[in-house]
């Protein structure tokens, strides 16, 4: 008797398995790589993205593009995660990661057609990765993080691929200034640079990009509390930072006080006033010129302060307050009674309020040894500023990477070509079936120089053959493509560098991702959330408004 076919999975589930899945994943990853591919290199194109709310993003930062895309295919989603990781980890090379991973999967496709087992391919890839990192170590050259010229060349090669390359020096200068300012020595020659906390980028539309600068201090979008009465320009201010409200505290819950006589009322008011006066006197003991608080500041406190000639700023963001503290050497105090002389910040050279565009900004600048800074960006339009800010982030990350790990590799696809040549040589020493995927991995590394050549519009095949000839035995490690002209040049002379840990991270991330996607052999989609059998859709929790609060819903029978 013939068996009737068994149904294991529900009808609503789709299941794909075997080589079908591999092909689908590889196609999806290649599609993602193709979106990004044209944004690699100095001659890169921009992408314009419309987001759900109708806003526009114009960018060629790989990560920014992928972040905005809505993607249905699961494999493509994990490709996007790659560039996210890369962005968070080293801040640069987001485009290269995707292009490399896409290429790795592309060369693997041929092997899957020939029924190679995915684990074999993965094993070969991992071996190739180890050898690639070893090659990187060999050709890396140390750099002095204090040598301004070489730092500039480095950061410039990172932003050379970005839209702002026409203002290359400007952005590179800003990035290096900012990162060297906030670097903290950890001892043992290590420097820690916290970009997120201590470097603020203020974008103000208007003016020209050339007006952008790094302030030796901080600025924030606030004016003094009483503009007419308080000074707006103070040289060498004494700054006190508070974290508490300078106003009368209301009771936690409703307090009822019975007043018998009329005088009691005025007494109550007087106590409130005295409380505030005390607070202000405690602060004024230290003769500050500027009081900044994160919380509120009542009219009365404002009056006492302005009478003493003290400028006050209220309701400042906590992050901004931290930056001010770092910049002028003050300590943020939680209660006015705990103020000490050491808490007063005297490191700033100038406090002033300026009107830029149509808003007031307070500047605390000319600090002696600021450990925080603000980058002031000016530019024609919002979109332009956003793009410049993204490029600045990349540039600062590169500067930070160099400060952390001062080793250089050639840019312009030279590193990838050298790695590729060395791996090709090694592949002849590998026994067994793994030899072919290993060699394919070596060829995949050529995707980066090839894409660079494509984007400059030169004859790709000729250029690549010439480059491969130059790199044939792993010599001339520094010969690559000048992304602007597409000519084959020596990267040392053109000062086109990449940071070591960016490259290493790029290789690791892309190969590991390729392995992960190759290992997938089954996709089951359409899985429903598990529900108790027989339960209908879960009832929506009813929200009571005040109107029906006295209805019968309160006590269920």
Image (cartoon, grey):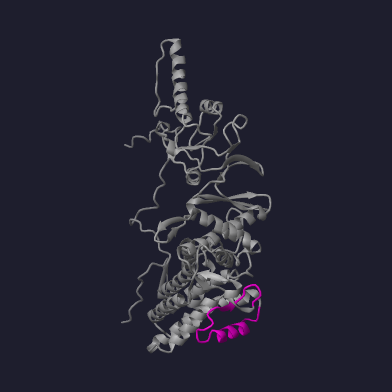
> Residue at 55% across / 26% down in the picture?
307
- The one of 76 and 365 positioned closer to us in this rendering: 365
Q: Does the magenta-highlighted stretch encompass residue 389?
A: no
Residue 489 at x, y percent in the picture: 61, 78
Task: Kindly indicate the quadrant of the structure image that contains residue 234.
Answer: top right
Q: Is residue 239 above or below residue 471?
A: above
Residue 284 at x, y percent in the picture: 48, 29
- The one of 72 and 471 positioned closer to us in this rendering: 471
Residue 141 appears anywhere in the view: yes
Residue 271 at x, y percent in the picture: 44, 20
Query: Which quadrant holds the C terminus?
Result: top left
- The one of 193 and 348 positioned closer to us in this rendering: 348
Q: Is residue 13 above or below residue 209?
A: below
> Residue at 62% across / 69% down in the picture?
42
> Residue at 33% across / 79% down in the picture?
3
Residue 460 at x, y percent in the picture: 62, 81
> Residue at 43% across / 39% down in the picture?
342
Q: Does the magenta-highlighted stretch encompass residue 471?
A: yes
Q: Residue furthest top?
A: 261
Q: Read off the magenta span.
A: 458-486
């Amino acid at each position: 008797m013939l068996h009737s076919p068994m149904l294991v999975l529900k009808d609503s589930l789709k299941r794909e398995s075997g080589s079908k899945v591999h092909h689908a994943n590889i196609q999806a990853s290649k599609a993602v790589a193709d979106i990004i591919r044209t944004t690699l290199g100095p001659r890169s194109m921009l992408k314009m993205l419309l987001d759900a709310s109708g806003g526009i993003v114009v960018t060629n930062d790989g990560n920014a593009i992928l972040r905005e895309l809505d993607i249905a295919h699961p494999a493509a989603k994990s490709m996007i995660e790659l560039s996210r990781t890369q962005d968070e980890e080293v801040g640069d090379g987001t485009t290269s990661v995707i292009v490399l991973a896409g290429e790795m999967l592309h060369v693997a496709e041929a092997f899957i057609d020939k029924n190679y087992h995915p684990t074999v391919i993965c094993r070969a890839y991992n071996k190739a990765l180890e050898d690639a990192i070893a090659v990187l170590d060999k050709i890396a050259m140390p750099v002095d993080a204090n040598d301004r010229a070489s730092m500039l060349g480095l950061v410039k090669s990172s932003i050379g691929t970005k839209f702002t390359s026409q203002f290359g020096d400007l952005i590179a200068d800003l990035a290096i200034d900012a990162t060297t300012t906030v670097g903290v020595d950890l001892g043992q020659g290590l420097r820690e640079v916290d970009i997120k906390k201590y470097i603020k980028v203020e974008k103000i539309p208007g003016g020209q990009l050339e007006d952008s600068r790094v302030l030796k201090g901080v600025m924030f979008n606030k004016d003094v509390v009483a503009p007419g009465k308080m000074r707006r320009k103070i040289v060498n201010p004494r700054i006190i930072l508070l974290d508490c409200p300078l106003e009368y505290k209301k009771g936690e819950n409703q307090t009822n006080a019975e007043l018998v006589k009329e005088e009691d009322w005025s007494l109550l008011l007087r106590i409130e006033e005295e409380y505030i006066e005390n607070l202000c006197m405690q602060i004024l003991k230290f003769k500050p010129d500027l009081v900044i608080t994160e919380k509120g500041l009542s009219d009365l406190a404002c009056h006492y302060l302005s009478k003493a000639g003290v400028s006050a700023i209220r309701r400042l963001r906590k992050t901004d307050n931290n930056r001010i503290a770092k910049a002028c050497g003050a300590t943020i105090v939680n209660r006015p009674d705990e103020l000490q002389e050491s808490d007063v910040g005297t490191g700033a050279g100038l406090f002033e309020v300026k009107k830029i565009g149509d808003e007031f900004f307070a500047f605390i600048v000319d600090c002696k040894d600021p450990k925080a800074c603000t980058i002031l960006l000016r530019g024609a339009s919002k979109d332009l500023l956003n793009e410049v800010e993204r490029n600045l982030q990349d540039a600062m990350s590169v500067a930070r990477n160099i400060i952390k790990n001062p080793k250089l590799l050639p840019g312009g696809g030279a590193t990838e070509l050298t790695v590729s040549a060395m791996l090709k040589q090694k592949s002849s020493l590998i026994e067994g079936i793994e030899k072919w995927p290993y060699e394919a991995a070596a060829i995949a590394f050529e995707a980066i120089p090839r894409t660079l050549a494509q984007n400059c519009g030169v004859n790709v095949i000729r250029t690549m053959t010439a480059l491969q000839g130059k790199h044939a035995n792993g010599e001339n490690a520094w010969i690559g493509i000048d992304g602007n002209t597409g000519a084959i040049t020596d990267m040392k002379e053109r000062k086109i560098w990449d940071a070591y840990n960016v490259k290493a991270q790029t290789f690791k991330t892309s190969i590991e991702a390729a392995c992960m996607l190759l290992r997938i052999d089954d996709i089951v989609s359409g899985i429903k959330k598990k529900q108790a059998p027989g339960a209908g859709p879960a009832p929506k929790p009813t929200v009571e408004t005040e109107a029906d609060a006295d209805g019968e819903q309160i006590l269920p029978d």
